[in-house]
């Protein structure tokens, strides 16, 4: 399988870094990160990743707003998005589905398993 | 390897095609951007070469559209412009490479070969089946280290089957994948190639690899169990080793992030301190809650699973409406603080529970996958379809209550609908009629499943707008065959919106696409194409309004004189162009002349004034291939032949 390109959008530096290192080590994927929703949405259009990991709770432009933004742009709307969150509530899950998210990854994740989980949920295996 | 060239420079196309064909590439060509788009959607290509300046649809837009719809092969852009911003724009549009004119043919061919060799295109580790090895990078096939010499087509067949071990390939799909549009041999040829391939494989010792699934196609048989375990080749690190390395890297990064984690801890300690003198200020509470949330999400990353649990309990505690008893909170904060100070231990076991939850949203179509919506109140039939269709690359969405049709259409728009005739709540025919009343679903292929074969019932289906019907009980080969026929036709004829506001006919742009497609089909499946031009003579003493009325009336009557699938377009203010593939008439003048004359006579009778409309409406026709090979040429020919009706 060709190396995948992943964009991680999360305001927390530790989560960004661990996810990046984990995907690089276990899957040899190319990973780029953004620290805010605005930066992430802009980067997605030029970087054209194969998938986006998107944090739900962020200041200013949060995950859902970023998700909608990605959906509005024809350059990015086809990119599968996996949401990152420490809590999953049913009510919010519905709005994620409506906004087009493919999966929710519950934090904390296991850096050893993350890449395989992404492959499985996006059908990349 | 299959290549599509889209360039309006016909000289270049010819030279390049010859060059590539000599290297055993299968090449399709077109000079129009929109046609390029249709080609790319109707067959899989490994590489697409696009000129930027194209008629129909420019190369950049086409490139963007290809990427948006999931085309994963390579794209090379050709252009006369050479500025950096153009280059960036091209690459942003999803092109893999860029070549500025003028360039030499050698340079272009070299660039193409480089792109085709690229791992992103090929992503080709060696393919294996028992003792057989197929190296797609070298087009090399060996069986127990003996090279098997194959022709390009035999090799293509083998590689395709090896890449999709479970899939059954019909003759149609094989033709589409391995032959160019202009060179479509019959099924006999495929049989011959398969036969030769089988013989060569057998001689080399790879016996019985390809299975003939009766009435359906070909499939790779499961590989025989390996005689002895394979020796690991270069001993790549196992999944487990890599996972442990990633965990170790996370733990090693902990110290770098200790200050950030410490800040979050501080916010919690402040809340604990403030709880000694209630009430807890809102600002402190909300800061602490945010910090607890972040710690819950991050501590586990470093192996501090217990810390994540503690932080989650703190977050929940701070989220309660009545923050009363502070002692429990303070105790939890102290425990967490201790965890953080101790830091992670050296561990290699999985760190706590790691969960990813797929969201049941509308599935997105993947490459070459069609989605079929099946509506039937008989769940046995639905289960049968669920079992039959997925091996053919068809996604099935089933519905046993026709009242949910609209919601299902919105949730995941299908490429085709299978409808039961007799259902509770809404009759299939009525549902079909309702679908056809909405512009969005007018071109959606609809097939009926019915046990009833009475002529009147069948007639009613077609009247309601159905494309075809299939008798129950369902026979797999028949079902699959008919589905693909409709799906492929649907894709080809599905065009961009382009309706003439006055007449409701296709406008010239959409008409061009439809006629070009018919012409393409006429080329591909050698069939005549009849082009008929109707022209309202300008010397006819009609007021602009009455000319418009006549156009509208003509547009309404023409569909009754032509067949479904014929193209009818408003070509100009006073022109209508009709294209009929494999027409049933021997002469369009004879076929269309009398009914049109009758139509005009009727209008004459019902309208005042004394105009001789017969002399006002002219008809001219031309036929592919006798009168020309291009739309322009045929149209010019038809113009020359314009003559009054009757």
Image (cartoon, coloured by chain):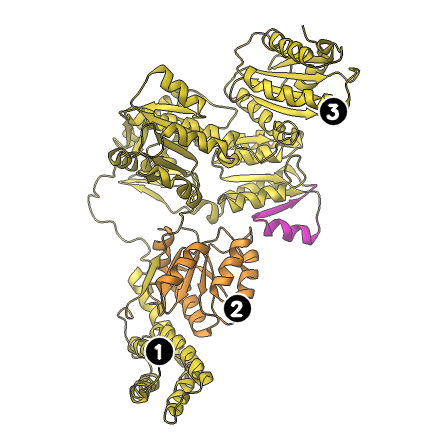
Chain colours: A orange, B yellow
Classify mark 2: residues with Cα within 10 Å, few (<14), some (14-19) or many (20+): many
Residue B30 placed where, x, y %? 59, 31
Task: Examine the rendering and report whether any part of residue B146 can be seen.
Answer: no
- Residue highlighted by disc 3: B545
Q: Which residue lies furthest to the bottom in this view?
A: B277
Which mark is on residue A36?
2
Residue B448 found in image quarter: top left
Task: Examine the rendering and report whether any part of residue B163 can be seen.
Answer: yes
Residue B209 to residue B72: above or below? above
* Labels 2, 3: front one: 3
Is the C-beta separation of discs 2 and 1 under 8 Å?
Answer: no
B603 relative position to B194: left or right: right
Look at the image and give the residue range highlighted in magenta: B82-102
Residue B531 to residue A11: above or below? above
Which mark is on residue A92?
none
B227 relative position to B156: left or right: left
B386 relative position to B114: left or right: left
Residue in the image at 51% along x and 30% along y = B492
* Mark closer to the chain start, 1 or 3: 1
Cα–Cα span, label 2 and label 1: 29 Å
Residue B191 placed where, x, y %? 35, 22
Q: Nearer the viewer, residue B448 or B540?
A: B540
Q: The C terminus of chain B lies in which quarter of the figure?
A: top right
Label 3: state its secondary structure: helix
Residue B496 to residue B171: above or below? below
- Residue highlighted by disc 1: B320
The subunit carrying tag 3 is B
Residue A43 within the magenta-colored segment of the rendering: no
Residue B91 within the magenta-colored segment of the rendering: yes
């Amino acid at each position: 399988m060709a190396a995948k390109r992943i964009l991680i959008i999360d305001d927390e530096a530790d989560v960004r870094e661990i996810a990046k290192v984990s995907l690089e080590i276990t899957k040899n994927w190319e990973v780029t990160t953004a620290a805010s929703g605005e930066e992430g949405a802009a980067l997605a259009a030029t970087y054209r990743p194969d998938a986006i990991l998107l944090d739900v709770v962020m200041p200013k432009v949060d995950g859902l707003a970023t998700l909608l933004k990605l959906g509005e742009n024809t350059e990015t709307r086809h990119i599968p998005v996996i949401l990152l969150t420490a809590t999953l509530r049913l009510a919010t899950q519905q709005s994620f589905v409506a906004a087009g998210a493919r999966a929710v990854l519950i934090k904390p994740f296991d850096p050893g398993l993350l890449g395989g989980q992404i492959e499985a949920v996006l059908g990349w295996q | 390897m299959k290549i599509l060239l889209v360039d309006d420079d016909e000289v270049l196309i010819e030279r390049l095609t010859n060059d590539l064909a000599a290297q055993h590439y299968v090449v399709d060509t077109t000079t129009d951007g929109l046609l390029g788009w249709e080609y790319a959607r109707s067959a899989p290509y490994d590489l697409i070469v696009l000129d930027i300046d194209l008629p129909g649809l420019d190369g950049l837009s086409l490139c963007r559209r290809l990427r948006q719809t999931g085309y994963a092969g390579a794209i090379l852009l050709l252009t006369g412009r050479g500025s950096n911003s153009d280059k960036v724009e091209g690459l942003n549009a999803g092109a893999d490479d860029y070549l500025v004119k003028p360039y030499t043919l050698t340079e272009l061919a070299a660039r193409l070969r480089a792109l085709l060799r690229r791992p992103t295109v090929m992503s080709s580790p060696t393919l294996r089946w028992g003792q057989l090895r197929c190296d797609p990078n070298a087009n090399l096939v060996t069986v127990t280290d003996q090279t098997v010499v194959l022709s390009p087509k035999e090799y293509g067949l083998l590689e395709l089957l090896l890449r999709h071990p479970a899939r059954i390939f019909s003759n149609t799909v094989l033709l589409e994948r391995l032959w160019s549009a202009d060179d479509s041999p019959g099924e006999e040829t495929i049989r011959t190639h398969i036969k030769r391939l089988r013989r060569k494989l057998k001689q080399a010792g790879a016996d019985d690899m390809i299975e003939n699934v009766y009435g359906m196609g070909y499939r790779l048989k499961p590989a025989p169990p390996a005689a002895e375990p394979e020796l690991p080749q270069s001993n790549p690190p196992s999944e487990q080793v890599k996972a442990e390395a990633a965990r170790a890297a996370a733990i090693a990064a902990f110290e770098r992030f200790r200050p950030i984690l410490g800040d979050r801890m501080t916010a919690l300690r402040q809340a604990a301190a403030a709880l000694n003198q209630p009430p807890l200020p809102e600002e402190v509470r909300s800061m602490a809650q945010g910090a607890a949330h972040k710690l819950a999400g991050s501590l586990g990353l470093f192996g501090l699973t217990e810390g994540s649990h503690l932080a989650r309990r703190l977050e929940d505690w701070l989220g309660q409406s009545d923050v009363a008893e502070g002692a429990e909170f303070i105790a939890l904060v102290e425990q967490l603080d201790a965890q953080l100070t101790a830091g992670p231990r050296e561990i290699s076991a999985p760190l706590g529970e790691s969960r990813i939850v797929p969201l049941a949203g509308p599935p997105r179509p993947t490459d070459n996958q069609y989605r079929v919506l099946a509506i039937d109140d008989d769940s046995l039939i639905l289960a049968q379809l669920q079992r039959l269709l997925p091996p053919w690359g068809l996604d099935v969405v089933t519905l046993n209550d026709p009242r949910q049709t609209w919601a299902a259409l919105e949730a995941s728009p299908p490429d085709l609908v299978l409808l039961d005739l007799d259902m509770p709540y809404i009759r299939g025919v009525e549902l079909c009629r309702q679908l056809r009343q909405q512009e969005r679903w007018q071109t959606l292929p609809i097939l009926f499943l019915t046990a009833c074969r009475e002529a009147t019932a069948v007639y009613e289906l077609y009247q309601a707008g159905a494309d075809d019907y299939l008798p129950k009980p369902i026979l797999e080969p028949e079902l699959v065959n008919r589905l693909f026929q409709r799906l492929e036709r649907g894709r080809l004829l599905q065009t961009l919106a382009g309706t003439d506001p006055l007449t409701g006919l296709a406008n010239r742009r959409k008409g061009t696409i439809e006629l070009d497609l018919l012409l393409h089909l006429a080329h591909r499946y050698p069939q005549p194409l009849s082009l008929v031009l109707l022209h309202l003579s300008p010397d006819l003493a009609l007021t602009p309004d009455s000319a418009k009325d006549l156009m509208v009336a003509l547009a309404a009557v023409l569909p009754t004189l032509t067949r479904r699938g014929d193209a009818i377009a408003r070509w100009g203010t006073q022109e209508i162009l009709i294209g009929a593939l494999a027409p049933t008439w021997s002469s369009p003048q004879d076929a269309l002349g009398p009914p049109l004359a009758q139509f005009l006579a009727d209008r004459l009778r019902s309208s005042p004034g004394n105009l001789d409309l017969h002399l006002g409406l002219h008809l001219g026709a031309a036929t592919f291939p006798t009168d020309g090979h291009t739309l322009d040429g045929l149209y010019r020919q038809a113009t020359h032949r314009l003559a009054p009706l009757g």
